[in-house]
Amino acid sequence: MRAGAVCRIISGLLTKGEGYRNVTIDFASRQVREFKAKHPLPIGVLTTTTGKSVDVRNTVSENSDVFVNDYFLDNQFHVDSERIPERVVHAQGSGAFGYFIVTHDVSQYTSADVFNRIGKKTPVFGRFSTAVSNKGTPELARDSKALSVKMYTNEGNLDFLCSSLPVYDYRDPNDFTHIVHAGRQNPKTNLFDLTTLWDFITLKPTILFPSLWRFSDYGLPYGYRKMDIFPIHAYELNNKQGERYLAKFNLRTEQGLDNLTTAEAQALSSQDPYYFTRDLYNAIANKNYPSWRLDMDIMTLEQASKVDYNPFDVNRLWKRGTYKTVVVGRYVFDRNPDNSFRDTEQSAFNPAHLVPGIPGPADLMFKSRRLSYRHAHENRLGSNSENIRINLPVYRKTYTRDGSPPVKDNMNDVPNYYPNSFSGPVPTVDNRHPSEKLIVLDKTSVDLEPMADFYNHIIENDAHRQRIADNAAASLVTVDEKIVDRALKLLDLVDTDLGKRVTQSYNEQKKRADAAAKLDARTRVQPIAQCISAVQEGFLTPPKRKNC
């Protein structure tokens, strides 16, 4: 059946209001038509920003005095400032509203109200994103993805900033600026430069571990809905008795973990470069609500003091057998935002947004992030970013006021200093809070053991190991040869089999790349173009041409 016929059938079903069987509607492409269906007539009279109705003659500026046309002036002056600064990382994102529901009793570990009552529901907002890509770039690059979740609890906002990889990109806070610069556009060519990235990796070997995860199948999830997600840090928890635990949170997809090969991602990107956003939007619009199970890996402080590794190191996994896992509840996302800029782009997440019962991680990385996210929000959204509707907590009384809009009620006529004798808000005493402070010192040595364990024990078969080698080799093809030598030596130190596989794959891919470089761009892509044409002509039937 041809595409046009399918579209006509679907259109007919929509008109008749009939039910669907085994059909996923592309609601993303129908959005404006859906709005028209809800509002058959115009929603009101057009006005200027001050509320004055606009005469139809002022909607055309030719042969008119533009300096007294407020409609023209509104549009002309506002368009220059309607964008806010792009996020330095995680710029390309999409959002969804939903809820968290508690399914298991975890009160013995934490007194946090949000987790303490089976069946308790808490509204949430989540922002799904790519990590390195600039805003507007295709979403199917081999890169870690992310989900930031804001939980609007009765004790304040609780934010979890999660990565699709269970290890973080770096462990020294001072490396953040440099890894962003090394992994982004070259300042002269304005192109992504793999030489600078591999140069940095080989000089900072701990960064190789998350890179191996990205080269693996886990580096290309099959959409946001089919990836596991991790807040990374070891969080300190305390219960009502003040007893303390360490916990690593895990969000496990209930859609089934699934990943793409490099070729599948390239093919899908050629058809739909924003597949991740479209898939999420359509799943929710079709009421196929994506969900994740929230687990906690639990370790006592006594156990943490006896393990033979640093449990606070964000650049490694906890060793098997040193912790136990308990289930907490489920995240369900069931509503798309009505306005992406208002909600998704203006949302601001900070890992330091915690609640009583979750004092938070004690590692240096987390302390650094407490500061940097505050500064990022102020730069991007202004000093009152927490007053933006999507970021407002359920309850708030503060002496922080004034500044750039929005200021909301600005605490009205409440005294603006503390302490005061005139009934301003007063602090509370939380007897649950531990009296002792946890101090963490990090080892500065480089440990390749977690990388070897990942390659030999987490990766399940040789076919997957070969895909890691091929993906790593592909990223080295355009890299300076001296940096390639350093990279191959480092990979060999991790595991000799890994080093051999990458070296062999690199030599083969380099030879093909050198031959292809002698051809012009159109000639190089002709075989791929022929395959795409063959698929399009056959409308989802396998191409018959031999070179496809």
Image (spheres, rainbow, N blue to C red):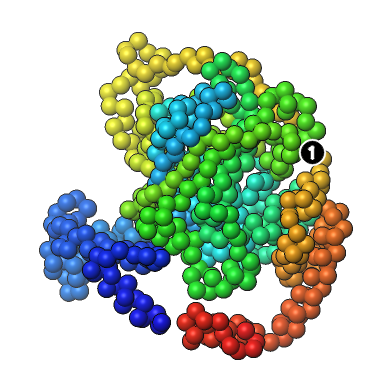
Report the residue at 37% width, 25% height from top: 397
- The answer to whether any part of residue 90 appears in the image is no
Please identify the residue farthest to the top as the structure is shown: 421
Report the residue at 63% width, 50% height from top: 165
Say what secondary structure mark 1 lies in.
Answer: loop
Q: Is residue 390 left or right of residue 506?
A: left
Residue toward you, 539 or 128: 539
In the image, residue 355 sits, relative to residue 515, either above or below, namely: above
Q: Which residue is mark 1?
A: 444
In the image, residue 207 sits, relative to residue 1, either above or below, namely: above
Q: Is residue 497 left or right of residue 403?
A: right
Q: Residue 212, image x and y in percent?
A: 72, 55
Q: Is residue 263 left or right of residue 92?
A: right
Report the residue at 35% width, 41% height from top: 389
Q: Residue 511, image x and y in percent?
A: 79, 79
Report the residue at 85% width, 64% height from top: 500
Residue 409: quarter of image: top left
- The answer to whether any part of residue 239 appears in the image is yes
In the image, residue 306 sits, relative to residue 51, either above or below, namely: above
